Amino acid sequence: MAGAAILSSFTYVPILLQGLGASDIQVTWIAGAYSAAVFISSYIFGRAGDIHGRRLILRAGLLASTLSVALLFLADSVEVLLMIRIGTGFCVGVYPGALAAYAHDSKMKMGRFASFGAVGWGVGTVIAGFAAGFDIHYAFLISSSFFLLAFLSALTLPPVSGVRVKVPLFPIETIKRNLPIYLGMLIRHSSAHAMWALWPLFLLSLEGADLFMIGIIQATNALAQVVFMLLLTDRFDSRKLISIGLVTSAMAFASFTLITNIFEVLPTQILLGLAWACLYVGALKYVTERNVEKSTASGLLQSVMSISGVIGPLIAFLLISVWPGYLAIMINGAIMSIVAFLMFVFSCRRAAANESNSGGSDLQTENAVVES
């Protein structure tokens, strides 16, 4: 339900902004402001999930997101929408770290866990796309309804055996332990967000495009993710998945440069679905298997993805200022994904060498207590 809610609003906010008279540059700045709010919130509440318990933070985040997304239905100017998006970003950043940690504590495989989010993305965009065909504001009403269902579902979650951990305000050891994936995700995802900031507008500019077709495009991506997450990702270790995800990301982004009409987008979304399935599940495995402070590590992963959402629109702004259009942004995405792959491989090898020299590193568990 949360996955459906997120993509339902994300897909149609840029189109609403364009309808309110915002320029492409204003769209990128508002996307960056939203991601900055998610970044701050993910850092704060990822840590809170380890200290105060997963379920409390999860429920609070979903309830706050329900209310904040509903406000998008009232947006009637660029300025009002900017303020609402900042508030929504802060609310949306509350729950992901606690949700991933709860799933791991429940002994759920990360590929299966992530696949439910991808199902939500697909279902949410199709339903929101259908609703947007009548009035684009209805897409945000649909999004808020999905968040409400997610909150009601979270009220039924039972306690699970897990840990509460005393986490420092600035968890430097957690950051160092997970630096390879944080760096790789930062580089790849920043270049991706440069594209996603204007992606709905790019799709709308193609021959044969309409709001419902955009929903179908997003759903195709999500369906591909579900298939690959369920059939593939739980069979490989985290490092191999991340490497596959980064290389196929470069291939998918390069394929965008060949698109001439809306129907040619469909096969690129299958490749992109494979890329994100491997990268995201690999990243979740990496941070949940290597850390006792799982909510903190997962929250930091979400923070990295969110700060990428700040950097990405800045990259888009710079690129379209020099080279108007979408081509330069797509080429940049392909190149940066290869850079991220090389950075990840190099960082993993260096981290392995450091652990070998120090005789291995143990997870810090002395402050952990069982949560009942």
Image (cartoon, grey):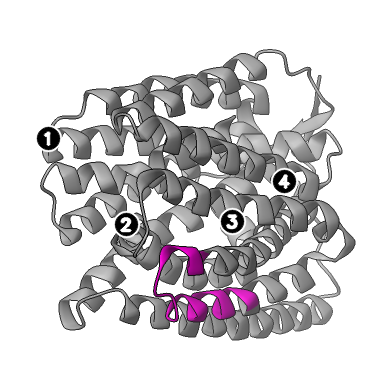
* Residue type at numbered disc 3: Asn
**Where residue 57 sits in the image (x, y, percent)?**
57, 26
Q: Label for residue 221?
A: 3
N-terminal-most mark, 4 or 1: 1
Tell me the residue at 25%/78% (across/down). Answer: 319
Check disc 2: other Cα within 10 Å, few if <14, some if 14-19, many if 20+: some
Q: Which residues are magenta?
A: 248-265
Question: Quadrant of residue 201 in the image?
Answer: bottom left
Q: Along the line of sight, which residue is nearer the eye, 79 or 260?
A: 260
Between tags 1 and 2, which lies in front?
Answer: 2
The secondary element bearing badge 1 is classed as loop
N-terminal-most mark, 4 or 2: 4
Q: CA distance from mark 3 to mark 4?
A: 12 Å
Please name the residue that numbered disc 4 is placed on.
Answer: 115
Q: Along the line of sight, which residue is nearer the eye, 55 or 72?
A: 72
**Where residue 356 sits in the image (x, y, percent)?**
83, 80
The secondary element bearing badge 3 is classed as helix
Please name the residue that numbered disc 2 is placed on.
Answer: 204
